[in-house]
Image (cartoon, grey):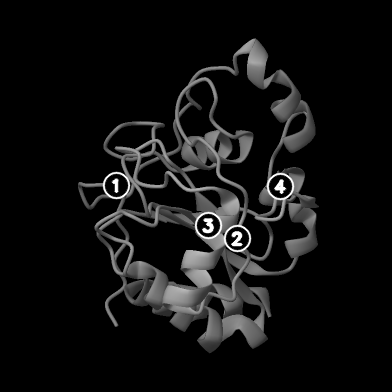
Amino acid sequence: MDDLIRTDLTGTDRAPVTAVGSPSPSHAGLVADAAAPGSTSLFDFSARDIHGTLRDLADFRGTVTLVVNTASRCHFRSQYEDLQVLQLAYGDRGFTVLGFPCDQFLNQEPGTDEEIEEFCRTSYDVTFPLFSKIEVNGRGAHPLFRWLAAQRGGIMGGRIAWNFTKFLVGADGQVIRRYAPPIPPLRIARRIEGALSAGA
């Protein structure tokens, strides 16, 4: 499988850029709950899972993760199937997909968390962790995605261009690569295998 190292809509990997904006007062509590001061890895963040329970991402310490902003009505929603294939292929080797629904792009994720989970489970048999719907851009962006975008920028700098932007994160919690929405998840398989070998 080709090892495509691409970001958003262009195809070239880029150096880290500065995170976009700061949270509005209405999101101050979210930031306080979701990121430790001076966050330096995936493990410094927390997020509410699809059932509303706050989950510490340090739970994934030592695990290679693929963090994806998803949307059930997006043209790329069939990528759920490939993401689940990766989960089944590498889940027992220390890998997991982390799905973060987002409704910021043409309102392509309008449902409730319960509806999103039902769609993912019944349509694609998703078993990887799903989280509560978030924003990924702007002043209300979840701190995790502000940090991810700062580590690997794309054609829009620190912004997420569209649904199904994918960040491969190593077992040490550091971002390895950012992949554009059109990149099929299965084309990341070789890079996942390399990250698993490096963390063994």
Q: Which residue is at 69% across, 60% downward?
A: 172
Sequence-wise, the earlier of marks 4 and 3 is 4
- Residue labelled with disc 3: 115
- Pick whichever, 90 or 131, lies toward us: 131
Residue 8: mark in rendering: 1
Quadrant location of the C terminus in the rendered image: bottom right
Q: CA distance from mark 2 to mark 3?
A: 12 Å
Q: Amino acid at mark 1?
A: Asp
Res. 40 in view: yes
Decide: is 73 above or below 143.
below
- Pick whichever, 151 or 46, lies toward us: 46
User: Looking at the picture, how far across and down is residue 30, in whole percent?
Assistant: 71, 29
Q: Nearer the viewer, mark 4 or mark 3?
A: 3
Q: Amino acid at mark 4?
A: Arg
- Residue labelled with disc 4: 48
Q: CA distance from mark 1 to mark 2?
A: 22 Å
Q: Nearer the viewer, mark 4 or mark 1?
A: 4
Sequence-wise, the earlier of marks 1 and 2 is 1
For the residues bearing labels 4 and 3, Cβ distance under 8 angstroms: no
Res. 66 in view: no
Q: Which residue is at 60% across, 18% downward?
A: 23
- The residue tagged with tag 4: helix, strand or loop? strand
User: Looking at the picture, how far across and down is residue 167, in whole percent?
Assistant: 47, 55
Question: Left of 176 or right of it: where is 28?
Answer: right
